[in-house]
Amino acid sequence: MKFSLKLLLWTMVVMAVTLGTGGFYFVNYVFQTSLARETGQALEENSILIFAFETAALNVPAKYDVLPDHTVEQIASNLESSGQNAGRMLRLSDEEKHTLYVSRGFDTDDALLYETSENNRTYRVLKRGDQYFIQTGSVVGALDRRLYLETMKDVSGVFAERAMGFKVYRRMMLLMLSAGAVIMHFIAFWLTKPIRNLAYATRQMAAGDYGYRAKVAGRDELGQLTRDFNRMAEALEENVGRLRDEIQAREEFVGAFAHELKTPLTSIIGYADLLRSRKLDEEKHFLSANYIYTEGKRLETMSVRLLDIMVARHGEVKCKAMAAERISDSLREVFLLGTDMEIRYDIEKAVVFAEADLIRTVLINLVDNARKASDPGGVIEVTGSREETGYRFAVRDYGVGIPEEERERITKAFYMIDKSRSRSRNGAGLGLALCTEILALHRSRLEIESVPGEGSRVGFVLPRGEEETSEKDEN
């Protein structure tokens, strides 16, 4: 069942119960008020009849010491037919509660008569067929006699008004419920519109349209829910986009990895088969073996770099305070021999907060990339300087440079701008990918500045450590 229909049905149930209960108490209140008024009038009329009877008894000739029964009957008959209410009914009983006079139609039992006493004036409501009466009873004292006077007043009109009131109210309630159902239908449709928008947006997203957003209607709780849903949809779209990028990156990684393996392995197998199947002269034998050795070393380097990347992605860094020049000294030792480049160092003395071996690996890779991008005999500059946010290391070369459209892709695994140049120097396109992972562990990132044909400057900033921050605050 739809929520709007549930809302409509429950509203109609509440309206029906409320209107029915309220109508019952209202009509019944009017009825009780009218009945109380009629009861008061009946008791007042009873008092008037007592006064009239006693007055008539005083006019009886003095020859009677005790009011005779026939005189009582005569007075009662006169009382019945006198006054504005000529149709009143009454009954007079003697001291023994035997009936002396009774009006036609006064057909009832003696229960009220036996409850009546001098100190207790009684009344009750009777039903005779389709008619209702108020019966009253009281004691009359006249000429040493103690008589009982009962009257009956027809109040069928009060009960008929109550029945008519319930009938009219039922019709009005049905009319109000019908009008309320139509109005609540449109109100429920309007109130549930944001829910329908959310449901439609959910179906669109389930179908793959992650860019769809639900229309915000109003500033109430449902409007806030719609805004929260749209924010959730944006976060979901971003996560899906990241997952797609990661999947694409993995597919590219696997393809590049397979390609990088296939090329050297094909050459290694080919030259190994040549050495095995043919007898070569010394020069060709050396060239074949050297090629196998060179490609094997490149595969070894690639496997080590890949292992380092995996470790960096899932590892944890234990940073320690150390001197920046200590890192540069270890870098000098690595490139002291075996390079035809001039490497210049300008390291400002300072304390950095990092994992020494990992930062050393980053700098080695940056210098190695600068060497590969430069011509023989070129200059490479390694600098270190203090900054407000931390300590900056940078490697500057004056080589081929990096095109602007390539800068966002060079940190991906196996990506090489000039593959022939990189492979000739045992490159596999994993150095900057490894640097990116290591710096992420240090809450840092690569910053690349480059002009094609003029060279590049690649650096990073190591954030201040807790010890450095505390020392600065004390100063």
Image (tube, rainbow, N blue to C red):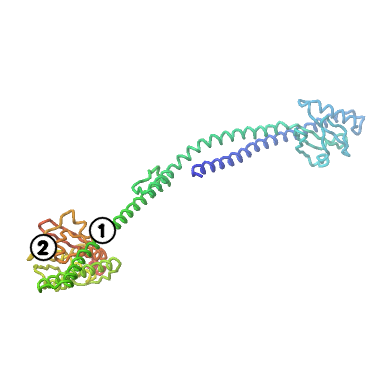
In the displayed structure, 359 sits above or below 217; it is below
From the viewer's perspective, tell me whether residue 67 is left or right of residue 449.
right
Q: Secondary structure at mark 1?
A: helix
Front residue of this view, candidates 140 and 77: 77
Q: What residue does disc 2 label?
A: 374
Instruction: Give the residue furthest to the right.
Output: 63
Residue extending farthest to the left is 377
Camera-nearest label, 1 or 2: 1
Instruction: Judge the density around disc 1: few (<14), some (14-19), many (≥20) Cα neighbours within 10 Å.
Output: some
On residue 199, the disc is none
Name which quarter of the figure residue 196 lies in.
top left
x%, y% of residue 238? 32, 53
> What is the x, y in percent for residue 292?
17, 70
State how far apart marks 1 and 2 are (Cα). Answer: 28 Å
Residue at the image point whose x is 78% and y is 27% from the top: 87
What is the crowding at mark 2: few (fewer than 14 residues within 10 Å), some, or many (at least 20)? many
Work out whether residue 205 or residue 33 is closer to the camera in this orientation and state it.
205
Q: Is residue 346 left or right of residue 55?
A: left
User: Is mark 1 in CB contact (under 8 Å) with mark 2?
Assistant: no
Residue 248: percent from the left, percent from the top? 28, 56
Identify which amino acid the numbered label 1 is placed on. Glu
As shown in the figure, which amino acid type bears the numbered disc 2? Ser
Q: Nearer the viewer, residue 442 or 89?
A: 442
Q: Horizontal placement of 76 versus 342: left or right? A: right
Examine the image and state in which quarter residue 123 appears: top right
- What residue sits right under mark 1 in the picture? 252
> Which is nearer the eye, 357 or 335?
335
**Residue under the point 66% across and 32% down:** 164
